[in-house]
Image: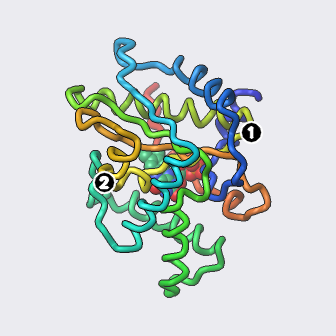
Amino acid sequence: MELEAAVRGRRSIRKFRADNIPKGVIEEIMEAARWAPSWGNTQAWEFYVMTGKPLEVFRKQNFEKLVAGEPFRADVPMPEIWPEHMKKRYGELGRIILATLGVKREDKEGRNRFYSEMALLFGAPCLVVACIPKDTRVEYAMLDVGLITQTICLVAHGKGIGTCIMAAAVGYPDILRKIVLIPENRRIIVSIAMGYPENADPINHFERPRAGLSEFVRWVE
Ligand SMILES: Cc1cc2nc3c(=O)[nH]c(=O)nc-3n(C[C@H](O)[C@H](O)[C@H](O)COP(=O)(O)O)c2cc1C
């Protein structure tokens, strides 16, 4: 796939088919993604690739905690306050998703159905969990994890595999640590749900707004 087409065409997939991705294909994706840049070539990242039984156990427990209303306690806490214009964009995403699902704003049950789907990882047959060592300077390693995460998503997209980067799958790090045996000295950063997209579902096709260049590029000439 042509590079720019891949960058523009990748999107978050929120409904996956149940079909497993062959392990060889996941290996090819990770193999290509390791060419992502990192500060000083430190490659601080570490990935746990969950499929099969362990993933099903995790999916169930993640769902149960969310349904029980247990607050997220991610290793990388979600900021509580966002600048106004970003809050607006975040709200707009929620509105578009609910409209695509045909859920009215006041329909709490409908909203909860979506959150449940999210806790169930949108049905993805694979979850890739990104970690860094706890003793690493977080700010720099976070950049590196971001770079390789997008690289994974792009390479997967090039192979017809959909991804959704998911904060909602690392909100309960204790279950990940128990099931995946992620050591205490690892900081769990983010995860990537991965699988073949359910192409017929509108949730994988809604239009995604993006700011125009004038909003975020300052020319210095
Ligand atoms: C760090 C990070 C965490 C995210 N967590 C979630 C998540 O928990 N659930 C979800 O549905 N999407 C999640 N997303 C996907 C974003 O909502 C998505 O990237 C954004 O809306 C832009 O849309 P696009 O990926 O389709 O271009 C996350 C993205 C990033 C970068």
Q: Determine whether, in the image, residue 48 is placed left or right of residue 178.
A: right
Residue at 65% in and 35% down:
156
How many marks are shown on the rendered structure? 2
Q: Name the residue tied to disc 1.
A: 160
How is the protein colored in the picture? rainbow
**Depth order, front residue of 92/28:** 28
Q: Determine whether, in the image, residue 142 is placed left or right of residue 113.
A: left
Look at the numbered disc 2 and say if its residue's Cβ is closer than 8 Å to ligand 1.
Answer: no
> Is 72 located above or below residue 163 in the figure?
below
| Residue 211 visible (yes or no) | no
Q: Tag 1: residue type?
A: Gly
Near mark 1 (Cα within 10 A), the count class, few <14, some 14-19 or many ≥20, is some
Q: Determine whether, in the image, residue 160 is placed left or right of residue 124.
A: right
> Is 167 located above or below residue 189 in the figure?
below
Q: Secondary structure at mark 1?
A: loop
Q: Position of residue 72 (x, y in %)?
A: 31, 60
**Hey, which residue is sitting farthest bottom in the picture?**
106
Q: Which mark is residue 78?
A: 2
Near mark 2 (Cα within 10 A), the count class, few <14, some 14-19 or many ≥20, is few
| Residue 66 visible (yes or no) | yes
Q: Tag 2: residue type?
A: Met
Q: Position of residue 14 (x, y in %)?
A: 61, 57
Q: Position of residue 176 (x, y in %)?
A: 37, 47
Residue at 74% in and 39% down:
160
User: Viewer-nearest of labels 2 and 1?
Assistant: 1
The N terminus lies in quadrant: top right
**Hey, which residue is sitting farthest right in the picture?**
200
Q: Secondary structure at mark 2?
A: loop
Q: Earlier in the sequence, mark 2 or mark 1?
A: 2
Residue 159, located in which quarter of the rendered image?
top right
Residue at 69% in and 31% down:
4
